[in-house]
Image: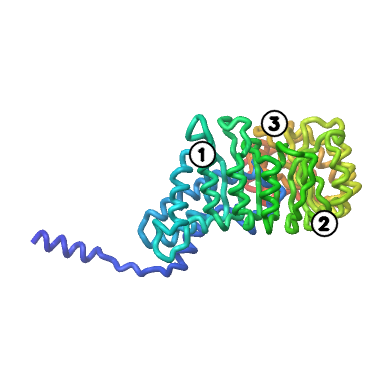
């Protein structure tokens, strides 16, 4: 009686769940693993703001998505087949010790082993590679970097490569030739190269070889000084490159307008012109095409007006100006009055700024409101700065909104929303 009763109970509990079509599961997986603005074409709207600060905002989301993707492929064989493209679409290398297993899996798959007959190699799904090792698997030697080269060679459809290594374990080590050769091997598919930090910088000749091998490169970011022949002239033509962020003293600043016909956006560190002799010649050659410029503004003000005058003189079509500050107090509103733009982006790298600092920048913006008549939008481009304003400096923000009330000038958060709409719930809680 008891076994029959148990069987009857199981029978009553059995539910026939209708099977969902694979296309619907793929839509579900897409939304479950989605990270905004890290793939093409969404990432293009952040073209001038890529680099360490962009990665700092998005890496937590990427790691969270990676965790979800790893769980999805473990549920069942059906989900393994459906979720594998999502798992390998973005590869995030956060630890050196992960490289050995990753390189083995990709190499096996490339040789047709370890996958179902007719399935694509795992590396063919990868569009984005983030090289962000926080440690080395070994204290000495370059085994990790040799494995990294093996991984890269297995990614024939790679579109975005971002190097964001910050550990001191690599010291002043340059990216070895074996990795640069691997990048050159997959370069025809690359559209974005982003060297976000000073660790493992590429040799200048090696970077030139990678860039030369690209066919559709749109964004080239490597703003730190490289080792190599800085007096040489780049011999490549980047017909699709719209965004350039490289040191002002290297070969890419010697490129002619015919070598950079599509250039529209420039990012550079604003320093003393005497130390940057290529700046004015570059502006004379390319300034008329530029519509957007991003400045890394130094913590001092003296002798920094010349580059601003260069922008005002040689960039008649400039519409967007984004300034990245070390501290808010280094924002010198008077320096930017000669430039006629309709969009001004502001970002401060210092976290936990004081109310006094925000009052300083708000006062500066109030002066620009009247002295830059073409200005229509001011956007705080950092989520950290916006959250500080909303949570810690509410009174300063409310005061700013009162000052700009009735003005044509929009004050926006990092997502382009009006700050006046974000501050409404704050009134309700006061």
Q: Looking at the image, is 173 positioned above or below residue 70? A: above
- The span from disc 3 to disc 1 (Cα, nearest Å) is 42 Å
Give SS at disc 2: loop
- The span from disc 3 to disc 2 (Cα, nearest Å) is 47 Å
Q: Quadrant of the C terminus?
A: top right
Total numbered labels: 3
Q: Position of residue 247 (x, y in %)?
A: 76, 40
Closer mark to the observer between disc 3 and disc 2: 2
Closer mark to the observer between disc 3 and disc 1: 1
- Asked whether, in this view, residue 210 is left or right of residue 80, the answer is right
Residue at far right of view: 313
Residue on which the image places disc 1: 144
Q: Which of 56 and 117 is in front in this view?
A: 117
Q: In which quarter of the image is the N terminus?
A: bottom left
Residue on which the image places disc 3: 354
Would you call the spot at circle 2 few (<14 residues within 10 Å), some (14-19), or many (20 or more)?
few
Q: Is residue 286 visible?
A: yes
- Asked whether, in this view, residue 326 is left or right of residue 171, the answer is right
Which picture quadrant has residue 176?
top right
Tell which circle, 3 or 1, labels the residue nearer the N-terminal end.
1
Q: Where is residue 228 in the image (x, y as percent from the top left)?
A: 72, 38
- Asked whether, in this view, residue 75 is left or right of residue 172, the answer is left
Tell which circle, 2 or 1, labels the residue nearer the N-terminal end.
1
Residue on which the image places disc 2: 258
Q: Are marks 3 and 1 in contact (CB under 8 Å)?
A: no
Q: Which residue is painted at 65% across and 34% down in the image?
A: 351
Q: Which residue is painted at 74% across and 45% down in the image?
A: 245
What's the mark number on residue 123?
none
Which picture quadrant has residue 163?
top right
- Asked whether, in this view, residue 259 is left or right of residue 354, the answer is right
């Amino acid at each position: 009686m008891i076994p029959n009763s148990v069987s009857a109970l199981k029978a009553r509990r059995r539910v026939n769940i209708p099977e969902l079509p694979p296309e619907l599961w793929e839509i579900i997986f897409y939304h479950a693993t989605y990270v905004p603005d890290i793939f093409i074409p969404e990432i293009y709207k952040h073209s001038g703001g890529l680099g360490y600060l962009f990665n700092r905002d998005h890496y937590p989301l990427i790691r969270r998505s990676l965790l979800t993707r790893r769980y999805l492929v473990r549920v069942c064989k059906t989900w393994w087949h459906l979720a594998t493209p999502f798992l390998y679409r973005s590869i995030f290398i956060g630890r050196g010790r992960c490289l050995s297993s990753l390189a083995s899996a990709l190499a096996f798959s490339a040789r047709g082993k370890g996958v179902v007959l007719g399935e694509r190699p795992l590396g063919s799904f990868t569009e984005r590679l983030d090289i962000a090792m926080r440690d080395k698997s070994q204290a000495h030697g370059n085994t990790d970097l040799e494995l990294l080269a093996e991984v890269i060679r297995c990614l024939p459809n790679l579109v975005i490569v971002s190097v964001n290594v910050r550990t001191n374990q690599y010291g002043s080590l340059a990216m070895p030739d074996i990795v640069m050769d691997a990048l050159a091997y997959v370069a025809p598919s690359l559209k974005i190269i982003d060297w976000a930090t000073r660790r493992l910088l590429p040799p200048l000749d090696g970077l030139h070889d990678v860039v030369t091998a690209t066919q559709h490169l749109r964004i080239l970011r490597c703003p730190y000084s490289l080792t190599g022949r800085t007096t040489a002239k780049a011999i490549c033509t980047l017909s699709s490159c719209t965004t350039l962020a490289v040191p002002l003293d290297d070969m890419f600043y010697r490129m002619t307008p015919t070598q950079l016909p599509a250039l529209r956006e420039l990012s550079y560190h604003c320093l003393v012109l005497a130390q940057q002799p290529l700046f004015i010649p570059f502006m004379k050659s390319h300034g008329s095409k530029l519509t957007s410029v991003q400045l890394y503004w130094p913590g001092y003000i003296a002798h920094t007006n010349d580059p601003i005058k260069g922008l005002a003189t040689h960039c008649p079509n400039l519409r967007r100006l984004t300034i990245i500050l070390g501290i808010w107090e280094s924002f010198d509103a008077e320096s930017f009055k000669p430039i006629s733009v309709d969009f001004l982006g502001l970002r401060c790298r210092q976290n936990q700024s004081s109310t006094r600092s925000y009052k300083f920048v708000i006062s500066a913006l109030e002066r620009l409101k009247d002295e830059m008549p073409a200005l229509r939008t001011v956007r705080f481009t950092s989520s950290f700065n916006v959250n500080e304003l909303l949570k810690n400096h509410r009174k300063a923000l409310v005061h700013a909104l009162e000052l700009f009330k009735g003005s044509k000038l929009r004050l926006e958060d990092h997502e382009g929303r009006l700050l006046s709409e974000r501050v409404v719930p704050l009134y309700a809680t006061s």
